[in-house]
Image: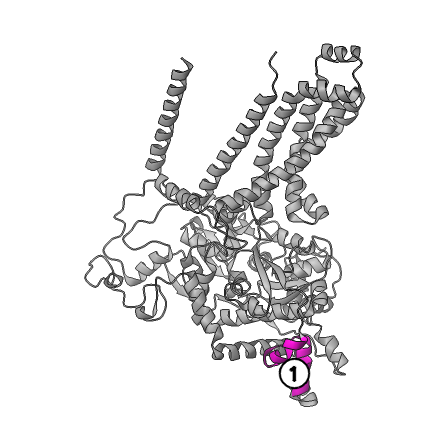
Amino acid sequence: MSDRFSPYDADRPLMLKCSCGGNHAPADHHPEMNADGAAAELRRRSLSSEFEAYSNEFIEATLVKALFPQDEVRRRFLRAVGKGTAMAAIASVLPVGTMQAMAQDKGQLEKTNLKIGFIPITCATPLIMAHPLGFYSKEGLNVEVVKTAGWALIRDKMINKEYDATHFLSPMPLAISMGVGSNPVPMNVATIQNTNGQAITLANKHKDKRDPKMWKGFKFAVPFEFSMHNFLLRYYVAEAGLNPDTDIQIRVVPPPEMVANLRAGNIDGYLGPDPFNQRAVYEEIGFLHLLTKDLWNGHPCCAFGTSTEFIQKNPNTFAALYRSVLTAAAMARDPKNRELIAKVIAPQAYLNQPETVLTQVLTGRFADGLGNIKTVPDRADFDPIPWQSMAVWMLTQMKRWGYVKGDINYKQIAEKVFLLTDAKKRMADLGQKAPEGAYPKFTIMGKVFDAAKPDEYLKSFAINKMA
Amino acid sequence: MPKSLNFKATLVSVLLLLVFLAAWQLATLPAAGGAAGPAVSAEQAEYLKMLGKDPGAAKAGGFPTPLQMGQTAWRHLANPFYDNGPNDKGIAIQLGFSLARVGLGFLLACMVAVPLGFVIGMSPLLRRAFDPFIQVLKPISPLAWMPLALYTIKDSSISGIFVIFICSVWPMLINTAFGVASVKREWLNVASTLEVNPLRKAFQVILPAAAPTILTGMRISMGIAWLVIVAAEMLVGGTGIGYFVWNEWNNLSLTNVIFAILVIGIVGMLLDLAFAQLQKAVTYVE
């Protein structure tokens, strides 16, 4: 195909790098590859022994890390009981990896026809791609991934048991379990779906207002009240000295309407999920002010979860589901798969978005709307570990902005909702002292958050809405 | 004479359509090209590509041209029954889901509203007793019921049907009551004189006399139900023409949204025509 390079065309640049923007030779690229082709290629990669070993190890490492967040504790435990017992302890919770052969005869699936809800945004990538890539069916599950119209509906359908498991905004299971904004129904976060991957998008007319101190009177949109989007936007403007409740307006708006409202001049910007930040750039109506990665690198965003009742009634099904989603996360983490993943999730049945928009979000090589091409490989990432300190941070923000009142037992709620295996009980059965919870420290906008001292952290903020 | 009038009206309609299409075409003409200057660096070219613009070719504007519309319509209509899993179905399947929901909700509404309206119409006492409730419940937007329905019924598709039911009930109830109440006194008197039993009076005198009014109520209800289903399905999602609109809105694809709007309009018109025919069939000309 000579027209791909057009060396003699005076009006076109000579492109020796692949025209897709990817960092590979043009010969390696198959422009005619469609979603099916991409899915087939990814499936082929997932069947390679190399990936299988990698993903098994990944899953096991994820579990072990989640069980023993402090390496010291893990080593002490391993030394005390030996590898075999440790593996058996973990396998009794979740039959994984090397235990798969064993799992075959003991893991009778309680339920095989499942309905999983998702919102069509890139955060849902692992959950979605596990379907066309056959990760669910490989575990013997017949899963229907159902596109859902909004977060409130996801909440209602989970409470109504129409869905067996779902894509959540990671603070939602906390809110639902506590009965904030709905009936209290115990929910669990099994894995974090994605980390980073959000951005603050501003309308083109605000190109000269890059300092948040100039945002007084701005109208912003976020997708849901109990979302990292809401908490991070509030945090960001408050750090700039604005009160998010009085100095700016924050509305709950579904993401596609964010783009339309931005075009209509109805809002000045939004902290929204991708691909709708990149979509605003694609539509040439907004620019990326900053990526949320720059506020808190590695922050959780969406989660994969289900009700506590479902896990208790269907432990083996849940384990199989858990494994499929973790396998997908392992695949999605690898940068070399990202371009193909964009192809797989772009069609109508999943995200229904232009492929180039998704490619930019997932590969991290993107147009910023200001005329620059940026390369940020970890713009969106897929780190599945639901650290309980993340939950504690969310709870501090819920308290900070008045969504919950009074004293909160942060750790108790965090441990009840995040993670989720009844690992501790099993370990107690084995006569072992359960490991401490998972509370690494995080740095958010330059400030270290220590989950051991949530109240002190809260008191350090001048702008808040605590009664 | 009426034949030539018909002919002229058709002619004017076609003319109006052509004018409309021409105006549309003119309004959506791509801005005169030439923007692609010769000095595009590789980086700039890549940037343009990221914005969905091929270097050299003008990017299609946000609003589709009539030609694009035609292509989209053809693409949807050429294969209306495909089914690619729960999130991607052909337009005919989506319409089928919507029609089934409307039909079910409407039927339930008929089963409640017509007998109840009959009773209310025959008894002035009940009419007054029911009136305040009807007056309060009638103006409530059907979609306002949705959260309540989702909370109590705990099933999104039944909630959708319930919303259709609740919006269809009132026009039918009021019209039935009105039709039954305004049956000519002479006919009732004649029936009394002939000592017709109440059941026979209801079915052989009142029902035929009130039938045109009852059907008017049904026609209004059907119109409202079809209006509501699209909004309800946009809220609840899953299947149906309303879900289709939402899904394409999620994709910010105006072409598909406009196509769906046209389809909704045409189906609504057909439903209305069907009820007009029914109405004609039961109208008694003195």
Which residue corresponds to the image point at 40% horizontal and 17% vertical from the top-left?
Answer: B3
In the rendered image, residue A410, in percent from the top left (x then y), is placed at 71, 66
Tell me, yes or no, whether the highlighted magenta stretch contains residue A100: yes
Which residue corresponds to the image point at 35% horizontal and 61% vertical from the top-left?
Answer: A32
Badge 1 element = helix
The total number of labels drawn is 1
In the rendered image, residue B242, in percent from the top left (x then y), is placed at 54, 43
- Quarter placement of the N terminus of chain A: bottom left
Which SS type dominates the magenta stretch? helix
Few, some or many residues within 10 Å of mark 1 (<14, 14–19, 20+): many
Which residue corresponds to the image point at 62% horizontal and 70% vertical from the top-left?
Answer: A320
Q: Which residue is mark 1?
A: A87
Which residue corresponds to the image point at 75% horizontal and 13% vertical from the top-left?
Answer: B188
Lateral position of residue B109 relative to residue A19, left or right: right
**Which one is nearer the viewer's eye here, A315 or A433?**
A315
**Which one is nearer the viewer's eye here, B15 or A25?**
B15
In the figure, A109 relative to B33: above or below? below
In the rendered image, residue B266, in percent from the top left (x then y), is placed at 48, 34
In the figure, A36 relative to A205: above or below? below
**Which one is nearer the viewer's eye here, A337 or A36?**
A36
Res B106 → quadrant: top right
Residue type highlighted by circle 1: Met
Lateral position of residue A220 relative to residue A355, left or right: right
In the rendered image, residue A451, in percent from the top left (x then y), is placed at 66, 70
Give the magenta range.
A84-106
Q: Look at the image and tell me whether residue B74 can be seen.
A: yes
Lateral position of residue B61 relative to residue A187, left or right: left
**Which one is nearer the viewer's eye here, B159 or B218?**
B218
Q: Chain of mark 1?
A: A
Q: Look at the image and tell me whether residue B63 can be seen.
A: no
Tell me, yes or no, whether the highlighted magenta stretch contains residue B183: no
